[in-house]
Image (cartoon, rainbow, N blue to C red):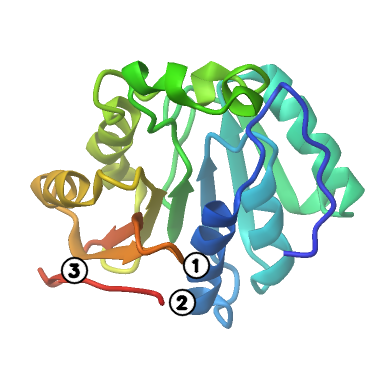
Amino acid sequence: MGLSLKIDERALIPRPETEELTEEILAQFRNEKNLDVLDMGTGSGAIAIALSRFLVEPNVTAVDKSPEALELARKNAETNDLSSKIEFRQSDWFTDIAGTYDIIVSNPPYVATGDIAELKEEIKDHEPLKALDGGEEGLVEIKNILQRADQYIKPESGVIFLEIGHNQGEEVRDFAASQNFTDINLLTDTQGNDRIIHGRKGNKHVENCSNS
């Protein structure tokens, strides 16, 4: 998205799928002002920085459990002249979060533990495993977020956006519905894989969509 980001062993390398996630948020909210945004597991800060740059005067809070990742994210925000626009906070997901948000976004760990060994060497040997490993089925942290996010999303207007694994779409959609999320949309990436899910509080309506 035209941003300069330093990436090292403290955080995942931002990939095209995460850029697509960010672009979907911008497509829906680019012209709305003063949105309250929460970026969960910010890592390098890529999502928070992009939303802070391209949304209209948003209030962005970026959290991560790792103090090392937060240090990297702060440096990247400084590089992009956005240090004063983003609040960085150490938190294990919602543990140290209060209030409600218009947008909650996360690219959480979603690789199944048993699949870690099959990842390319440049990923498994150089990127933080805690940012990759989503438990036995890759869904532990996704479900953790969905179970707790309801109380942090603004009623009616608030939306949650998650990046998910290519084979997780149906299960994540069903779980989101079980956690009282509505208007649930499952989007595919440019490769045709399930990759983004978003939902809100509102009238119950579930769709399959493609962003091709």
**Tags 1 and 2 in contact by the CB under 8 Å rule?**
yes
Q: Residue at x 46, y 77 (%)?
A: 28
**Tags 1 and 3 in contact by the CB under 8 Å rule?**
no
Label placed on residue 169 = none
Q: Nearer the viewer, residue 145 or 5?
A: 5
- Residue lying at the far bottom in this picture: please name it: 31
Residue designated by label 1: 25
Quadrant of residue 182 within the rendered picture: bottom left
Which comes sooner in the sequence, label 1 or label 3? 1
Q: Nearer the viewer, residue 98 or 153?
A: 153
Label placed on residue 28 = 2
Rounded to the nearest angstrom, the CA distance separating label 1 from label 2 is 5 Å
Rounded to the nearest angstrom, the CA distance separating label 2 from label 3 is 16 Å
Which comes sooner in the sequence, label 2 or label 3? 2
Q: Residue at x 39, y 75 (%)?
A: 211
The kind of residue on which mark 3 rests is Gly
Percent coordinates x, y for residue 209 in the rendering: 27, 73
Q: Residue at x 14, y 43 (%)?
A: 175
Q: Secondary structure at mark 1?
A: helix
Camera-near label (2 vs 3) is 2
The kind of residue on which mark 2 rests is Gln
